[in-house]
Amino acid sequence: MPSWRGHIDATGSQTGPDLRKLEVMSTNTLPAALAEIVDDFQALTEPDRLQLLLDFSRGLPALPERLLDHPELLEQVVECQSPLFLTIEQEKTPDGVAYRLYFKAPPEAPTTRGFAGVLHEGLDGLTAAEILAVPDDMPELLGLTRAITPLRMRGMTAMLGRIKRKVAAADRLLS
């Protein structure tokens, strides 16, 4: 039984963690692909979550050649402990505009690459509204806060924030 559940004491009062926080951190408001990733992490033990993060690290796509030759098109996320660069591009679809996400992180930074892989798989190809609706605290939903240093968690939160800022700016230009 998960340890977050809390207990009811003899007087009928809840003990244990505040369940209101868990409501805020549900996956109901996430885009489907990201919600599925979060559910996968939450279903695992902490050591298995780290292994899954490494799997996402290995699955992060390489930059397309057009970006390899133009590093000035990438923006560094300085809050990350390891060098991480990202950019977004708009793509016309029959339903409007989708956003493509691109990341550059060194192979020797598996945590950073793993976080980028999660965001890529969960957000790539979505609309501005879908990306901007992702809660800023989404990285906490992965259940890695005890296994990963606070600085690394801050890096993932910064990656998400940078993506959202770039998408919002690009979307304003369309209006």
Image (spheres, grey):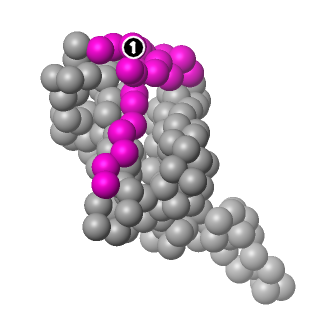
Q: Position of residue 142 (x, y in %)?
A: 45, 50
Q: Residue at x 59, y 70 (%)?
A: 5
Q: Which residues are magenta?
A: 70-92
Residue 91 among magenta residues: yes
Residue 126 lies, with reference to residue 90, above or below; the image says below
Q: Is residue 169 above or below residue 92?
A: above
- Position of the C terminus by quadrant: bottom right
Q: Residue at x 71, y 80 (%)?
A: 8
Is 118 included in the stretch rendered in magenta?
A: no
Residue 104 coordinates in the image, percent (x, y): 31, 23
Give 7 or 48, whichever is nearer the viewer: 48
For label 1, count other residues whose C-alpha is less than 10 Å away and answer few (under 14), some (14-19) or many (20+).
Answer: few
- Looking at the image, is 67 positioned above or below residue 6? above
Percent position (x, y) of residue 124? 33, 49
| Of the pair 24 and 91, the residue shown nearer to us | 91
Return the residue at label 1.
72
**Residue 47 appears anywhere in the view:** no
Nearest the viewer among 67 and 16 is 67
Say which amino acid is labelled 1.
Answer: Glu
- Residue 16 to residue 88: above or below: below
Q: Determine which quarter of the picture holds residue 111.
A: top left
For the question of whether residue 99 can be seen, the reply is: yes
**Residue 71 left/right relative to 6:** left
> Could you say whether the residue bearing mark 1 is in a helix, strand or loop?
helix
User: Which residue is located at x 45 percent, y 70 percent?
Assistant: 1
